[in-house]
Image (cartoon, helix red, strand yellow):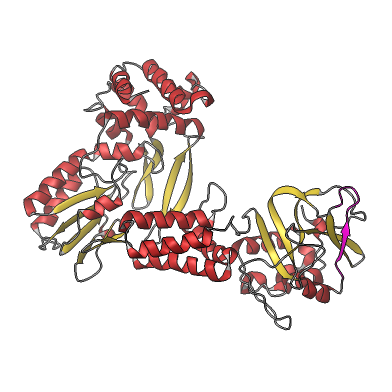
Amino acid sequence: MDKETLINKARALESRKDLFNLLNEIKADLLGDKSYPFTRKQFLILCNPKNDKKRYYSFEIPKKSGAMRQICAPCGNLKWFQLCLNEIFKALYTPSPYAMGFTEGRSIVDNARMHTNQNYVFNIDLQDFFPSIDQARVWKRLQLAPFNFNPKVAGVIAGFCAIKSVRYDKKEAFAECFVLPQGAPTSPLLTNAICDTLDRRLHGLAKRFGLHYSRYADDITFSSMHNVYQSESEFRKELKRIISEQHFTINEKQTRLNHCSGRQEVTGLTVGAKINVARKYVKDVRAILHIRAKYGMNAAYATFYPRYKSEKCQLHRGEPNLENVISGKLCYLKMVKGENDPVYTKLQAQFARLTANSTSSQVKPNIDYIFTMSKSDFENKLGVTIELRERVNDKKTYGCFNFQDRFFVVAVSKNVDINNLPDNLQISLTRMQKPVEFYLLPGQPRPEVLPTVTRIGYLLHKPLRGYRTEPKAQETTYGVSDELKSFVINLTDTYPELQLKDDMDIIESYNKDNLLARLVDSNFDLSILP
């Protein structure tokens, strides 16, 4: 459906039925053959924010300040209702020229560019930006130009876009309310529409005092060659009055004034003679590429992943691919600094060299290497010998050893040449996140059977790239990952007879030295694991 057709159909909306039919048309246009229509029941239930069950799910992400930001993301059909409504909003509404966030063709770079080569940069933040806009305010705005919906249609749309919440007074709940959620597809555009009057008045204020003005969501920036930003100045008083009249509140803790003699920042970018990223950003990219080149992909991944996960908090689509992340960071650097910038071109060239002949040497993130040691050390510590045999049914090679009157089967990696075994062969205790056909049959007397679908067991392989092999006389100590810590805690709680916590001292000291030997000494048996 082209934009003009959508605008005409949106202008003709007279009832809930008209809106329902238009949303189904938009969904069919977005999904094509994969689309299935909304039902009347879904429409009537989800348009009422009082029916808050299964409408949103919440999670937290860290703010730059260290605090946590709560995100409320719509579930299932509500998300698709909002995506279809957003298509209507985008067709009807064009944000003001001062709104840089959530607008096609505008970015944080455009926002920062307005404030380069200025002596003073003044930043303020609006407190509780999305929750401060309630359903009634959205309803009224949708009845005004350019939307011009009648009250009934505007009420249904506002209901789809709101979430049930509670207002607080001195940290005590005192009233139920319905507000815009931070995390809904419709919230950004609606906030821009509601802030039209705010943008117009603040631009007028900036013009009056000879300032530059822009807004990126709840981040408001003024800049100038002269200082009018004193706490009791006429500008500050007028600024506070306008924002208060528009039913917003300034977050005083996030208010800052930066002079050109120091670091000036606008929406995460430094502004001075030109726009730039923070030094730490370039430093981090350079460090990852250095580790990738010197120690391998696995070492780079091990360095990068803990920080990435702590920053993102919630990974919706599995574990990140490091090469994709680096590529994204370089694209961001290109957007900010330009494709001809020497820093970007040098890092991009280094990344291209590292990935030119690589099919990604990174260990697949769906397998956890709980513990890794050399084959010889493994045999010496346990007093066993790993034998390589051939399965009868399919002639595939497997390893096996006997320990404490039990028979264990070891999977053999495809990268191992049985006829020419390397001296530095390693063995790992591994865990798969998804059950796979893995030749791991702990305790089974006959290895000739077909591979078992399992999650955990031993794997014989070449040295992992990124691990620095040490002389046999030395012990290697590895850092303990959060996943391993959680694994040991769960193992300790589930099987207290193993007495792992006191013996290993892993949870308190984060020391994983000789983990496998300690597990074995504690009568650890793979066959008891799910």
Query: Where in the figure is residue 226, as x and y percent of width and height?
Result: 10, 63
Q: Work out which quarter of the rendered image holds the N terminus and state it.
A: top left
Query: Where in the figure is residue 47, as x and y percent of width and height?
Result: 42, 27
In which quarter of the view is residue 144 placed?
top left
Query: Where in the figure is residue 21, as x and y percent of width and height?
Result: 41, 17
118 in magenta? no
Residue displayed at 24% across by 64% down = 264
Query: Where in the figure is residue 220, as x and y percent of width and height?
Result: 23, 52
Considering only vertical position in the picture, is 60 above or below 102?
below
The answer to whether residue 460 is seen in the rendering is yes
Q: Nearer the viewer, residue 463 or 57?
A: 463
Residue displayed at 32% across by 43% down = 102
Provide the residue span drawn in magenta: 385-395
Q: Is residue 66 left or right of residue 150?
A: right
Considering only vertical position in the picture, is 5 above or below 486?
above
Type of secondary structure dominating the magenta stretch: loop
Q: Nearer the viewer, residue 216 or 321?
A: 321
The answer to whether residue 49 is seen in the rendering is no
Residue displayed at 75% across by 58% down = 413
